[in-house]
Image: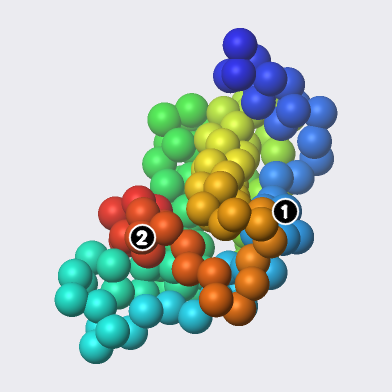
Amino acid sequence: EWTTAIFGFVSATPSIKPSPWLMDYLESSTTLRSDECDDQDHAEGLDWKTIILPTLKYFLSIVAKDCSLDPDTCAISDAGEYRAQEDNATPGAVLQLYYFALESIIRSSSNTMLVTSDFTPPMLVHNVRFH
């Protein structure tokens, strides 16, 4: 049922992108430096430009190939925006699910549901393997 809802949402949306809240959070978040973290899998795990965006671009190219789509038509912009394909909603649905999940994880760990200066996101989102 939830897959039908996501595919329906993506089919009716011309582009998929992170919410303004999530994009602001990702762009303004400070990453953990290696000297602040004992576990190297967590160091710099939330960096949008060097970790998340390249991973999403690579992943979308794989999804495009699996869906017999031209990888160039499944490109994601530096702002995280993806132009939905009319003939195949799969890449957009997968990307939208990622954005929904990431924002839900970050927001759910804050008691006030607002990011404050002393807010620390769950370590899961700092793990490079998560992205």
Residue 6: image quadrant is top right
- The label number, if any, that marks residue 19 in the structure image: 1
Describe the element under mark 2 as helix, strand or loop: helix
* Number of marks drawn: 2
Give x and y (percent) for residue 129: 29, 54
Q: Please name the amino acid that badge 1 sits on.
A: Ser
Vertically, is 2 above or below 39?
above
Give x and y (percent) for residue 76: 60, 55
Which residue is outermost to the bottom? 35
The residue carrying pointer 1 sits among few (fewer than 14), some (14 to 19) or many (20 or more) residues within 10 Å by Cα, namely few
Residue 54 in sight here: no
Is 94 left or right of 17, judged from the image as shown? Answer: left
Q: Which residue is mark 2?
A: 123
Sooner in the amino-acid sequence: mark 1 or mark 2: 1
Is 48 left or right of 10, judged from the image as shown? Answer: left
Residue 39: image quadrant is bottom left
Q: Which-is-in-front pick, marks 1 and 2? A: 2
Residue 118: image quadrant is bottom right
Is 10 left or right of 51, judged from the image as shown? Answer: right
Marks 1/2: CA distance? 21 Å
**88 or 43: which is nearer to us?**
43
Q: Residue at x 33, y 84 (%)?
A: 33
Vertically, is 10 above or below 34?
above
**114 or 28: which is nearer to us?**
114
Describe the element under mark 1 as helix, strand or loop: loop
Q: Please name the amino acid that badge 2 sits on.
A: Met
The residue carrying pointer 2 sits among few (fewer than 14), some (14 to 19) or many (20 or more) residues within 10 Å by Cα, namely few
Which residue is outermost to the front? 111
